[in-house]
Image (cartoon, rainbow, N blue to C red):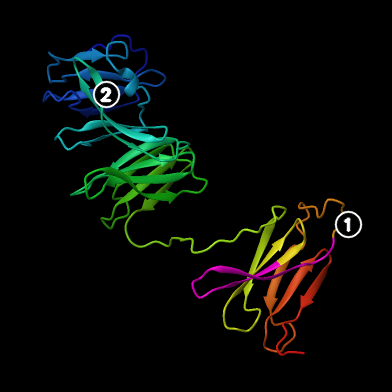
Amino acid sequence: MLKLEDVKRPPESMLSGDFDHDGVTDLVLFIPGEPLVMVQSVTPDLARAKVLTDKTMPQFGLVQAAGPGNTAMLDADGDGHDELLIADQNFVRACAFDPARGWRVVEQVTLPEASSQLTALAVLPGAERPTIVAFDKASKRLVLMDRDASGAWQVRDRLRFGAFDATTIAAGRFTGDEQPSVVAISPGAFAVVRLAGQRVTLDEVSSYRSDNENRLEHEIEVGDLNSDGYMDMVVLDAREQMCQIFSFSATRRIVLATEFEVFESRLFRGGDSREFEPRAAIVTDLTGDGANDLILEVHDRYIVHPQMTRPR
């Protein structure tokens, strides 16, 4: 039996590893509301065991953020020994312990977004390169990190989680098909995230911004409004009550074809954006001539703009 001096509560969880690289297993204990405790040289008879606290471990500040959910084990520098991985703020750092100098950082992966809050951590093992998986509470995303061709750690991918707020994540194979996946756990739910196979992603190909800052675009409708066989886009504005019609070039650039004011506001400052008028648009053939028309819903009426099919 080994007495844990100055420890007031039982540990919530622990990690085992050779943190000081002396060939003997060490334990890191996570205690609720208290700094982590390390037990060095854990042998069956505990003859060499030594309890280290935050007061007796030099450079303890490097690992003070470590807890049950934001830590894992990984040989981050390839020296054959697992280090203690810690996710904190916008970085994941790997730390080893030296009996004389204390804790030291051997590797660190830093996200470019300073506002990131990495709160949960897991390691997905791989035959050639393991993957670090962290949960970013600020952006509600899973962040995947691995080594590039040169051996440097990089952020490989980000997966959006929506409103799910994970407190703990585990990496492994949980879907029965031997493919990598992640289980994310929150106080009231859990989610299984498949990492293999194909998934749908969105790539930005073009963008448009009006020169007029007093615009509040709120509604989009699409359809062929000039019978050229290509889709057009209708955008409604709630501040100046404008209707914009966009086309797309052969290179998929957004081109403003025309715009017009749907109605004049009686308010001195222009339209009240809280009303969001005109509120909706419909593109369909309402006149029965085979060409799409534009219908705008404004207050208590519909305004029909028939498509001109031949010059007048």
The answer to which quarter of the image holds residue 305 is bottom right
Give the vertical position of 234 relative to 151 (above or below). below
Answer whether residue 1 is visible to the viewer in this image.
no
Which of 185/61 is in front? 61
Give the vertical position of 147 relative to 286 (above or below). above
Is label 1 or label 2 in front?
1
Question: Which mark sits nearer the N-terminus, 1 or 2?
Answer: 2
Q: Residue flagged by tag 1: what amino acid is it?
A: Arg
Q: Residue at x 31, y 32 (%)?
A: 93
**Residue most extreme to the front:** 211
Which of 173/227 is in front? 227
Q: Residue at x 68, y 81 (%)?
A: 292
Which of 259/111 is in front? 259
The answer to which quarter of the image holds residue 154 is top left
Q: Which mark is residue 266?
A: 1
Q: Residue flagged by tag 2: what amino acid is it?
A: Val
| Residue 189 point in image, percent of width and height | 47, 43
What is the magenta segment's predominant secondary structure?
strand
Q: Are marks 1 and 2 in contact (CB under 8 Å)?
A: no
Q: Which mark is residue 28?
A: 2
- Part of the protein shown in magenta: 244-264
Disc 2, SS: strand
| Residue 41 point in image, percent of width and height | 15, 19
Residue 39 is left or right of residue 280, and the answer is left
For disc 1, the neighbor class at 10 Å (few under 14, some 14 to 19, many from 20) is few
Magenta stretch containing residue 255, yes or no? yes
